[in-house]
Image (cartoon, rainbow, N blue to C red):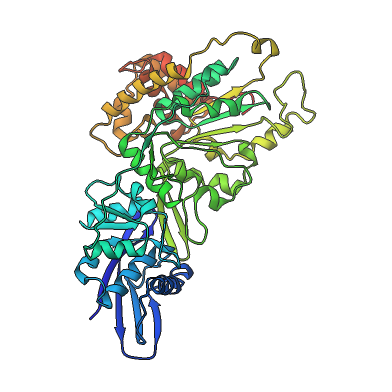
Amino acid sequence: MVAHAYTVAFEGVDARMVEVQCAVTPGLPAFSLVGLPDKAVSESRDRVRGALSTLHIALPSKRITVNLSPADLPKEGSHFDLPIALALLAELDILPKDAVADAVALGELSLDGALIPVIGALPAAMAAAEENRALICPAASGAEAAWVGGCQVIGAKGLMDVIQHVTGRAPLTPCDPGEVSHARDSRDMRDVKGQERANRALEIAAAGRHHVLMVGTPGSGKSMLAARLPGILPPLTPAEALETSMVHSLSGLIEAGGISRDRPFREPHHTASMAAIVGGGRTAKPGEISLAHNGVLFMDEFPEFPRAVLETLRQPIETGEVMVARANAHIKYPCRFLLVAAANPCKCGYLSDPCRACSRAPNCGEDYMGRISGPLMDRFDLRVDVPPVAFRDLDLPSSGATSEELASRIAAARTRQADRFNSRPDLRQNADLQGDLLEEVTELDPESRALLNSAADRFGLSARGYHRVLRVARSIADLDASDRLSRDHVAEALSYRLPQSTA
């Protein structure tokens, strides 16, 4: 008779159920593992054998065959150790077959029988809940998995604990969810002096999740501004926190099983590869754009990134998801992020600085900013110059709004958007507006319409650019708690869209 256990295989943030079938039959002693296992899964035979030996459980001198079904689904990772061991113990009549088949198990076994934490406990718990099964996992992963309601999560320190639990000798207590953390960033927008326009642009960007390009000389405060952006963003909603945590769970970024309400802030170096930015590699893991889901992706020295990397951002910016296609995998990851890009105006960085004239102007700036293609540049809702700050301005007291004040205004604007999109779960911020709803919520009076049309004709705005101006204007109106767009809202939105002196 064949014993059955259950585990999961990961396809992006989704976990697909995998049936572990074990049969012990007469024949030459062997331990075969089939069902498209990768190297880590194939090596589980030796880890399982060693763990059972530590518990003084001898394998019979027969042929042991373990099949991972469906057989055409690639199996990757070390979390298959525990379900393979449970299926084998059930086939040897050490564990009751029904009890083993009623749970989903995942965990890596050490040679002494201890359970080592693995990635993906959160999406595995969601899959178990959908199947109305309990989840058995390492104790260190239990707090993370317990965040999924409707799923009993059993965390065990070792294989012996699992055996005693399944047999009823020493039942384990279900795990409790980890801590919810939300730490307000100590860096304050009030620290930034002399960059009122850039400060305002980031406020608008945070209100509606609009992408920003800041261009300015070295040391003008671009990185300083971007680093303070998370401090004015509202905390993640429970649904957003779960979405973000699922991606981070697959990357092993969840610490102590805790769920964070802080929005992610990712700042990859400009030497990062395409796989690191958009996702990929041998196992098609999530990249920086997915790790920034529901948060901020800050790309400093933007033109220095490889051209191929920059061009791959075009589709994810529009759709909010990325398809990582490899020969052995086609994985879809969410990536609804706020892109903040910073760049110098030219290679030497001083094209726009009157005190340090660029020796190759204007070709230096045209060549350098030309690394950003027109279609990609068209996807930035806000483009702002960040000029150098005079030394005398640094000695003046801060006059701008604090991060707490900005956060309050932004939270109010996002609340208005949440009410507006209450019946449209696919829409969250104004950056997602499109179609009839965009026209409905951005209805313009004749004066505002004339201004927008005149600017579109004079500066050759594309259809995408035209609609992005409307979305930005809608966010500005939300910050003003206005139901209708005015000419001032449209004019301010246009001021961030029209050609700049350095961009």
- Assign the C terminus to one quadrant of the image: top right
Residue 89: % across, % down: 30, 73
> From this viewpoint, which residue is outermost toward the bottom?
27
Q: Quadrant of residue 396?
A: top right
Q: Is residue 37 above or below residue 105?
A: below
What's the residue at 39%, 23% (across, down)? Answer: 475
- The answer to whether one can see residue 449 in this image is no
Judging depth in this view, the residue of 390 and 103 nearest the camera is 103
Q: Is residue 441 above or below residue 372?
A: above
Residue 366: % across, % down: 68, 34
- Assign the N terminus to one quadrant of the image: bottom left
Judging depth in this view, the residue of 386 and 12 nearest the camera is 12
Residue 34: % across, % down: 38, 77
Horizontal side, residue 436 vs residue 395: left or right: left
Residue 383: % across, % down: 54, 27
What's the residue at 35%, 91% (across, down)? Answer: 27
Judging depth in this view, the residue of 246 and 140 nearest the camera is 140
Q: Is residue 272 above or below residue 40?
A: above
Horizontal side, residue 254 vs residue 483: left or right: right
- The answer to whether one can see residue 61 in this image is yes
What's the residue at 46%, 46% (across, down)? Answer: 253
What's the residue at 54%, 50% (across, down)? Answer: 276
Q: Quadrant of residue 438?
A: top left
Q: Is residue 155 above or below residue 78?
A: above
> From this viewpoint, which residue is outermost toward the right?
359
Horizontal side, residue 436 vs residue 190: left or right: left
